Image (tube, rainbow, N blue to C red):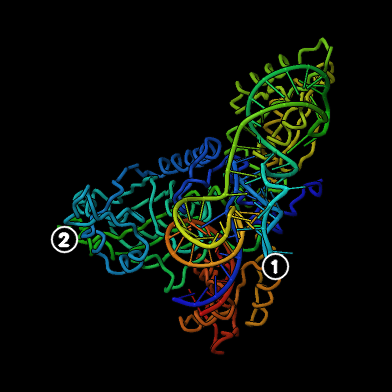
Amino acid sequence: MAGKVKRKKWSENFSEWYNELIETAGIQDKRYPVKGMNIWLPYGLKIMRNIERFIHSEMERTGHDEVLFPALIPETEFQKEAEHIAGFEGEVFWVTHAGHDPLDIRLILRPTSETAMYSMFSLWIRSHADLPFKVYQMVNTYRYETKHTRPLIRVREISRFFEAHTAHDSFEDAERQITEDLEIFDNLAKFLAVPYIVSKRPDWDKFPGAYYSLGAEVMMPDGRTLQIGTMHNYRQNFAKAYNIQYETEEGEHEYVHQTTFGMSERLLAAVMAIHGDDSGLVLPPTIAPIQVVIVPIPKKDAEADVFAYARKIADELRTAGIRVHVDERDIRPGRKYYDWELKGVPVRIEVGPRDLEGNKAVIARRDTLTKEVVERAVIVDAIRRTFDEIMENLYSRAKALLEDHIKRVETIEEAKEVFEDRRGIVEIPWCGEEECGLRMEEELDAKMLGTPYPDETAKAPEGKRCPVCGREAKFIARFARTY
RNA sequence: GGGGCCGUGGGGUAGCUUGGUCUAUCCUCCCGGCUUGGGGUGCCGGAGACCCGGGUUCAAAUCCCGGCGGCCCCA
């Protein structure tokens, strides 16, 4: 039955499909006259808010407090951590003037908030009793992207940037935080029905200033990967630059260990891309602004009032906590079907004279585009069951897409074939040397995502050799074309 | 950094090579009316565009120069 769902354009011309859908489905308007800065439209924003609501609840569950820092950072603060500034200075927006006068100390628009937050952390964190210290914010950040911008994916204003920042009394406790971040991320991914992989980034591609960086990637329909989450362990790098110290039980002064965890509206891009099809968006019921749309099918001269019937069902669903909308527009039902399919509403209920007579309703699933007739009396249960089935189907379909695109190879030639063919992720033995890693990136015209995480899964099997230098391989390295 | 392409109603486009019946094509969206209603009803009517500046010419959407904006490829 899934064969009924067409995903031709989606898979063969993903870029075009994506750009069209961003506007036709009402996610964003790209016509704002600044490159890389787009407007959130009401429908898209509602979806994003539902994703954020889940993130807020996870943050609360795990004891993070929400804060809001200013968007402007003085040049002097920005420059305190050497690697960090080197990594970002090429892409920050500067504020150099106020009115007609040049500023004494120039300001940057935050590309991320480490340098805004950490001088304050050093004031706030005094004692071991203050640790662990866990805060987060969801704000807009700015990066002057020089590559091609793409809505939600590569933008100059990230308008929904999530960043959690924590401070700990030891490396071990910071590691526990990374584990917690991964658990939060996993919950979120399940909520979105989005399967992913986690890699430890190679040293040359760490977050600027980090001890190590983890990236969570998803597989897009065209075989390229999209990073949708990152976790960094900073060790004491920033603490030393910003003098964030606490007093131990013994009265000593120690630098804190820090971590960050980041996500953005790329989460929505992933959901759109991974679950969509040729008819448009397919939203998981967990985040759909409208979970059920009811389309009344009137018949001329029929005495039955299908509208009243539809409204009654709507009330019932609403009482059960389901987000429902009755489409009473004066247009043909077929037109409504297309409209709501484009917008990805997970379930459609059709009610016409036939259903009213038999005390039934037709339930249509968005993910499979199949229909089923159900008894009016059990409609709430049927909808709930359908939601569960949709979540399962979306997840397993996406999981198959991801797994089909991961290929383990041993030579550069094999790896090249994968990228020529259908793309995806290549896993290849690697000695661990930067030189060999960069060489493979160049030869494959792909990026090294890193090594599988947790570390135990990154070891190369016995006897495998690095295809570049021929030495014994220590790791499995992942390569992909990325967004 | 190097090379290429392109700016036409809200969106997508035709026209440009060879200047003139361009009073600018078609689809979509939008507005009004009738009709219709279990997968994009049909018909009638309406609104809406040649990126900006300069030049060539009797005549420029079309050719030339400059500006601004966008896209693609390579390093």
Residue nearest the viewer, comparing A383 with A83: A83
The reply to whether dot 2 and dot 1 touch (C-beta < 8 Å) is no
Label 2 sits on residue? A252
State whether discs 2 and 1 lie on one chain: yes
Q: Amino acid at mark 1?
A: Arg
> What is the chain letter for disc 1?
A
Q: Which mark is residue A412?
A: none
> Residue A416 at what x, y percent from top left?
65, 78
Q: Is residue B70 left or right of residue A424?
A: left
Mark 2 → mark 1, Cα distance in angstroms: 57 Å
Q: Is residue A442 left or right of residue A381?
A: left
Say few, some or many: other residues with alpha carbon within 10 Å of mark 1 (under 14 / 14 to 19 / 20 or more).
few
At horizontal 54% and vertical 89% (from top left) the residue drawn is A469
Label 1 sits on residue? A422
At horizontal 58% and vertical 69% (from top left) the residue drawn is A480
> Residue A51 at what x, y percent from top left?
51, 42
Residue nearest the viewer, comparing A40 with A402: A40
At horizontal 74% and vertical 32% (from top left) the residue drawn is A335
Q: Is residue A434 above or below residue A58?
A: below
Question: Regarding mark 2 in the picture, which secondary structure is present there?
Answer: loop
In the displayed image of the protein, which residue is found farthest to the bottom? A470
Quadrant placement of the C terminus of chain A: bottom right
> Residue A313 at what x, y percent from top left?
69, 20
Mark yes or no: residue A263 visible: no
Question: Regarding mark 1 in the picture, which secondary structure is present there?
Answer: loop
Q: Amino acid at mark 2?
A: Glu
At horizontal 59% and vertical 46% (from top left) the residue drawn is A22
In the displayed image of the protein, which residue is found farthest to the top? A303
Q: Is residue A248 left or right of residue B15?
A: left
> Residue A454 at what x, y percent from top left?
50, 65
